[in-house]
Image (tube, rainbow, N blue to C red):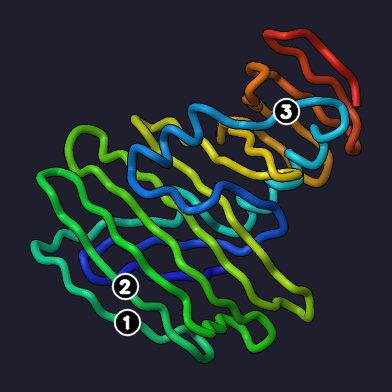
Amino acid sequence: MRLGTWIGIGLFTVAGLGCGGGSSKPASYSAVQDSIAHPTGTLAATNADMVAKAYQASRSAGTGPAGQRLDQKTSAVIASSACTVSGTISVDSVQMSGNAISEQFSYHSCCETADCCFNGPGSVYYETSGTGSLCESLQITGTCSGTPIAENFSYCSVGGTVSYLVEVGGESFAISATGTYSNGNGTLTITGKNGQFTCTYTNDTGTCTGSSGSFSF
């Protein structure tokens, strides 16, 4: 589902609406990276399946590097754009310093379809030098197909490596985008505060093996 258009500095990204969670809004590019590098949750048998489902929700929502392109513009312009059905997306502030760009945006009663409308802020941080690393944080509330939505998650693309940060039970977990997971099946690399694990899923059950041992769920 397409939720957002980056305007102003010419960054265009597709943001997403899913059923998982993520980090609260960080204050800077480095803060997003740090939150992914230092997840707060303990991965265990009680939450491994929920973490995978939160990751799938964020991915299927359309968030991430596959939904972005870059236009070459030389000035930062604060503006707004109409959503597909009704409401607007506004760029609230843009900061440019050397090779670093940050932009804060908001959804205002934004309906991309008649039955899916939302509000909330987000931020994108981009470095134009080197590999063009990018981090995004998104917070959304609203209603989609009659279901209340409360979405918070982040991702970073650094040197071609993409990681997502999702939240389950008030704790955050970093997940590498190199994994494959769909509807209870696949393999993911998940990092919690108790270390990095490779988790294999079969019909919502499986095994995680990592630096602090193994467990089944």
What is the CA distance from the residue labelled 3 to the residue labelled 2? 37 Å
Residue occupied by mark 3: 187
Dots 3, 2 in contact, CB < 8 A:
no
Q: Quadrant of residue 45?
A: top right
Amino acid of disc 1: Ser
Residue occupied by mark 1: 80
Q: Earlier in the sequence, mark 3 or mark 2?
A: 2
Q: Residue at x 73, y 44 (%)?
A: 168
Number of dots carrying numbers = 3
In the image, is 166 to the left or to the right of 15? right
Q: Nearer the viewer, residue 31 or 124?
A: 31
Vertical placement of 207 versus 139: above or below?
above
Q: Nearer the viewer, residue 18 or 45?
A: 45
What is the CA distance from the residue labelled 3 to the residue labelled 1? 40 Å
Q: Earlier in the sequence, mark 3 or mark 1?
A: 1
Local secondary structure at mark 1:
strand
Characterize the local packing of mark 2: few (<14), some (14-19) or many (20 or more) Cα atoms within 10 angstroms. Answer: many
Amino acid of disc 2: Val
Amino acid of disc 3: Thr
Q: Position of residue 51 (x, y in %)?
A: 74, 39
Q: Earlier in the sequence, mark 2 or mark 1?
A: 1
Dots 2, 1 in contact, CB < 8 A:
yes
Q: Nearer the viewer, mark 3 or mark 2?
A: 2
Where is the N terminus found, in terms of image quarters?
bottom right
What is the CA distance from the residue labelled 2 to the residue labelled 1? 6 Å
Q: Nearer the viewer, residue 14 or 50?
A: 50
Q: Residue at x 17, y 73 (%)?
A: 77
Residue occupied by mark 2: 91
In the image, is 73 to the left or to the right of 138? left
Q: Position of residue 160 (x, y in %)?
A: 38, 32
